[in-house]
């Protein structure tokens, strides 16, 4: 990505302008009421919008999950972790014998103990729970999507396998 420009829009929300590597301009306006507007501009005329879509908060989160790879992970990226500055998003498969099997996020105190966050659970049948609550339980063969700094993700994986962070 070439650049991201963030602008406060008093009384409206925030505007994010992205210049892609391919030279296209995308603008996202996040309204204070939760709506999002996405604009795509002509490469040849960056002031002339090609298209615009308005999404409510739930639709926006669904699109974010799709774009962020939480609902489908391309086969070519199955072993790739996503880095966001100091933060990582890592996919981790719960193997047979893992301590976490049958336990909930709340029972394991994942966030309190590790600082990491479970942002999705994908079951073997491909059913997905995006942003699982504290009562979400882990099962054998499910893939857990963990968000955190490297040490937090590592501690979270260790907790899931062994029941402790050390």
Image (cartoon, grey):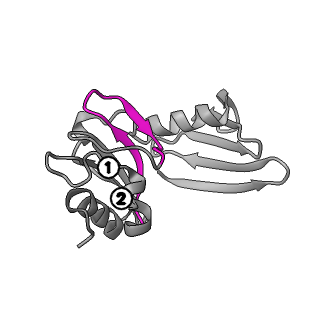
Do residues under tags 2 and 1 come within 8 Å of each other at their CB atoms? yes
Residue drawn at x 61%, y 34% is 58
Q: Identify the residue shown where x is 42% and y is 37%.
A: 129
Residue 165: x and y in percent read: 27, 69
Which type of secondary structure does the marked residue at label 2 adopt? Answer: helix
Please tell me the numbered disc located at residue 108: 2
Residue 155 % position (x, y): 29, 66
Q: Position of residue 66 (x, y in %)?
A: 45, 34
The answer to whether residue 25 shows anywhere in this view is: yes
In primary-sequence order, the first of circles 2 and 1 is 1
Quadrant where the C terminus lies? Answer: bottom left
In this view of the protein, which residue sits in the foreground, 95 or 136?
136
Residue 107 is situated, as x and y percent measured from the top left of the image, at 38, 56
Q: Report the residue marked by disc 1.
A: 103
Magenta segment: 115-133
Residue at 26 percent across and 56 percent down: it is 160
Query: In the picture, residue 73 is in which quadrant?
Result: top left
Task: Choose top left, top right, bottom left or bottom right for residue 142.
Answer: top left
């Amino acid at each position: 990505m070439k650049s991201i420009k963030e602008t406060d829009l008093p009384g409206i929300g925030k505007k994010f302008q992205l210049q892609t590597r391919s030279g296209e301009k995308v603008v996202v306006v996040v309204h204070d009421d939760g709506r999002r507007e996405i604009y795509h501009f002509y490469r040849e005329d960056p002031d002339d919008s090609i298209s615009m879509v308005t999404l409510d908060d739930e639709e926006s989160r669904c699109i974010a999950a799709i774009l962020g790879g939480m609902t489908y992970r391309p086969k070519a990226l199955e072993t790739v972790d996503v880095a966001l500055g100091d933060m990582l998003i890592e996919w981790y498969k719960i193997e047979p014998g893992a301590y976490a099997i049958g336990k909930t996020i709340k029972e394991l105190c994942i966030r309190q103990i590790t600082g990491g966050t479970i942002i999705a659970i994908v079951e073997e049948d491909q059913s997905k729970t995006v942003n699982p609550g504290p009562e979400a339980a882990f099962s054998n063969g499910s893939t857990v999507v963990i968000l955190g700094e490297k040490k937090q993700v590592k501690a979270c994986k260790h907790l899931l396998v062994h029941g402790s962070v050390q």
